[in-house]
Image (cartoon, rainbow, N blue to C red):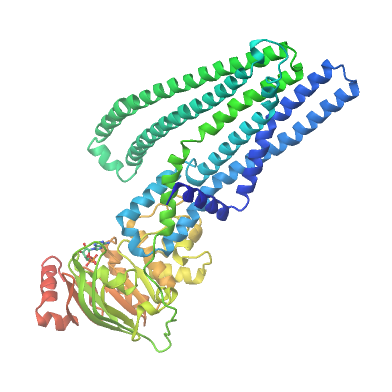
């Protein structure tokens, strides 16, 4: 997308996130630009009145007027300044809210896409400073507009000064038209030089910022590692702090300091050049205005007006120049943001509601699947029927495709070949809610959020306490929650609430189980639900398993073959294929893959 199109798009985005910010920024730019000229104008006017010995009433009226205007303008300017600054900062939160919505609705596969992950990472990094993307763009817009307006107003004011030069009132050098041309040319040259040098300075800032960002990244990652309770064990035992300290010192002393010193020398040189140039042109202009005044070409009031306005030309050009290189900083990050929002979803949901009044039957019909950008089949030619109320165990070695089977069933991914049917209809035809409501899943890599126990279990802000405690009891974690300071209202972990409670892996797994039970869906899927539990807790869960699932359909993945005993049927996966199905006894007598796994485990466990 071209620069102009991106700029247009950013304004549209700002306007859609915050309807008031563009108009209030425009008003602020106008008021900020007019502000200095009010005092310049009235000072000139008062001096003129004084030199003309005007009557006191007129002088007092003018003083009162300038005071009144100053109060109103000052109040308006500072109100708008605060208002716009707060709203600019909030833009970043509004952007992120949009990104969150996008992420929730994006295809699950996208979350594992390396290009998309890199995009998200850059978006997060950029957002760590609120001086980024749309807020930065709006600040730049404000400065740019102020700079342009200030320069234009100043020019309009000093036009009469230039005209005066054409009226020959004497024979001095200062009355020659050539002199006027010289002055205008000097201002123009100065403006161009300021713009060029300022864009160089901006480039240096950009480079310095990149260096700072790199150093920040390194040091925050070190702080993360050194301050992390979990890695703290290894750091201490292996004395890794010396290693990290060495890298940190080298990064600061070599990369960091030398690069930044070079950049600041360059910036200092350019800045002094601008300052000297500004002073020279300023000196020339003041001399010109002063000499003209001396020749009596205009009064002392006009002298003040012209000098003041000329000062404003310099400050206007500087302000405008300061914004020149900013687009280079803003555009790439804004592009990332728009790319995230544009990420395409290929998974289209149907609008058929799933009717469960007569139960259901699920069928995998010759299903094959490869993970995106992966050449190997994660599942190959799977044919399997799961009927209402059935308890199905899924077993197999690591990487044989068990979890992938569950992901396809829940339609987190779409199959590459074959189809998955529910009640004879392809799952693609059902609504997202129909499918979501069908399953309660505890994944192997379940995640408990840093919210309250009730929020986590009910997955909503409305929690039915009776149901909650019944689920907690079934998952054997009720007593632990009741002992927490604020019971089910206690925050877990400390990210969102400092008084949050840290829980162990086993406790978290029980909570994940309770969350699945609270959801109370027709199909319960447990993917290695007891991996983090000790043998006693594991045993308790097994003995309660039938009461968890009652007459629901259950799919149960486990490494521990003995724990599948209560299942009606066992499906054995091997190397992406479904190699056997049957009851425990049938599979043992078949003496196939299951019998092999069973015998291998029997030699470790006394079962
Ligand atoms: P299991 O649950 O039986 O341990 P999985 O279903 O997790 O096995 O994995 C099946 C195969 O798919 C493995 O070869 C694994 O490496 C691969 N796989 C699993 N998840 C992903 C993923 N997100 N991206 C790419 N490959 C994956």
Quarter of the image containing the C terminus? Answer: bottom left
Q: How many marks?
A: 0
Q: Is residue 363 visible?
A: yes
Q: Position of residue 501 (x, y in %)?
A: 43, 52
What residue is shown at x 17% (from left), y 74% (from top)?
577
Q: Which residue occupies the foreground of this view, 108 or 135?
A: 135
In front of the other: 45 or 570: 45
Asked if residue 604 is positioned above or below residue 168 in the image, the reply reads below
Q: Residue at x 59, y 24 (%)?
A: 184
Q: Report if residue 497 is visible in the image.
A: no
Foreground residue among 307 and 440 = 307
- Is residue 110 left or right of 304 when viewed as pictured? left
* Residue 222 image position (x, y, % from top left): 33, 38
Residue 319, quarter of picture: top right
Classify residue 24 by image quadrant.
top right
| x, y percent for residue 305 | 71, 23
Quadrant assignment, res 385? bottom left
Left or right, 71 with reference to 26: right
Q: Is residue 557 above or below residue 296?
A: below
**Which one is nearer the viewer's eye here, 32 or 18?**
32
Left of 438 or right of it: where is 461?
right
Q: Residue at coordinates 37% horizontally, 23% vertically from top-left? A: 261
The quarter of the picture showing ligand 1: bottom left
Q: Report the residue that reaches farthest toward the bottom.
A: 358
Q: Position of residue 211 (x, y in %)?
A: 36, 33
């Amino acid at each position: 997308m071209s620069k102009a199109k991106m700029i247009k798009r950013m304004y549209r985005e700002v306007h859609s996130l915050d309807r008031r910010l563009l108009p209030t920024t425009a008003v602020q730019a106008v008021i900020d630009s007019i502000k200095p000229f009010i005092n310049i104008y009235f000072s000139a006017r008062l001096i003129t009145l004084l030199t003309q010995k005007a009557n006191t009433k007129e002088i007092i009226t003018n003083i009162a007027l300038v005071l009144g205007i100053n109060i109103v303008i000052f109040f308006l300017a500072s109100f708008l300044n605060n208002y716009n600054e707060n709203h600019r900062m909030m833009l970043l939160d509004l952007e992120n809210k949009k990104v969150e919505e996008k992420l929730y609705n994006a295809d699950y596969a996208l979350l594992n896409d390396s290009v998309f992950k890199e995009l998200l990472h850059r978006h997060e990094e950029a957002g760590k400073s609120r001086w980024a993307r749309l807020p930065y763009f709006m600040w730049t817009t404000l400065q740019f507009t102020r700079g342009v307006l200030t320069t234009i107003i100043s020019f309009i004011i000093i036009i009469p000064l230039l005209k005066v030069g054409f009226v020959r009132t004497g024979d001095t050098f200062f009355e020659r038209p050539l002199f006027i041309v010289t002055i205008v040319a000097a201002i123009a040259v100065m403006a161009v030089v300021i713009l060029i040098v300022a864009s160089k300075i901006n480039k240096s800032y950009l480079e310095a910022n990149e260096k700072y960002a790199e150093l920040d990244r390194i040091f925050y990652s070190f702080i993360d590692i050194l301050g992390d309770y979990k890695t703290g064990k290894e750091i201490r035992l292996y004395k890794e702090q010396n290693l990290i300290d060495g890298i940190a010192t080298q990064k600061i002393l070599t990369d960091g300091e030398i690069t930044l010193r070079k950049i600041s020398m360059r910036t200092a040189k350019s800045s002094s050049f601008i300052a000297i140039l500004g002073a020279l042109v300023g000196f020339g202009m003041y001399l010109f205005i002063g000499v003209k005044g001396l020749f009596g070409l205009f009064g002392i009031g006009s002298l003040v007006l012209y000098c003041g306005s000329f000062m404003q030309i310099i400050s206007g050009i500087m302000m405008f120049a300061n914004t020149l290189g900013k687009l280079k900083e803003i555009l790439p990050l804004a592009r990332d943001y728009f790319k995230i929002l544009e990420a395409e979803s290929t998974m289209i949901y149907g609008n058929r509601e799933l009717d469960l009044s007569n139960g259901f039957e699920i069928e995998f019909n010759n299903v094959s699947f490869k993970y995106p950008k992966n050449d190997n089949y994660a599942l190959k030619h799977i044919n399997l029927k799961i009927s209402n109320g059935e308890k199905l165990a899924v077993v197999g070695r690591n990487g044989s495709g068990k979890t992938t089977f569950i992901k396809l069933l829940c339609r987190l991914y779409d199959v590459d070949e074959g189809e998955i049917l529910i009640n004879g209809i392809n799952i693609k035809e059902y609504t997202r809610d129909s499918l979501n409501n069908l399953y309660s899943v505890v994944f192997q890599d379940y995640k408990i959020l840093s919210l309250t126990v009730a929020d986590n279990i009910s997955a909503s802000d409305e929690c039915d306490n009776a149901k909650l405690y019944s689920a907690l009891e079934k998952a054997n974690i009720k007593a632990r929650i009741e002992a927490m300071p604020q019971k089910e209202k206690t925050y877990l972990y400390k990210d969102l609430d400092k008084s949050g409670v840290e829980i162990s892996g086993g406790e978290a797994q029980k909570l994940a189980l309770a969350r699945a039970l609270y959801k109370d869906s027709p199909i319960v899927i447990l993917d290695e639900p007891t991996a983090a539990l000790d043998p006693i807790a594991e045993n308790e869960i097994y003995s309660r398993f039938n009461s968890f699932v009652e007459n629901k359909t259950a799919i149960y993945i486990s490494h521990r073959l003995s724990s599948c005993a209560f299942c009606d049927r066992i499906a054995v996966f091997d190397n992406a294929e479904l190699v056997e199905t049957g009851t425990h006894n049938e599979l043992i007598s078949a003496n196939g893959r299951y019998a092999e796994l069973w015998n291998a485990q029997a030699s470790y466990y006394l079962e």
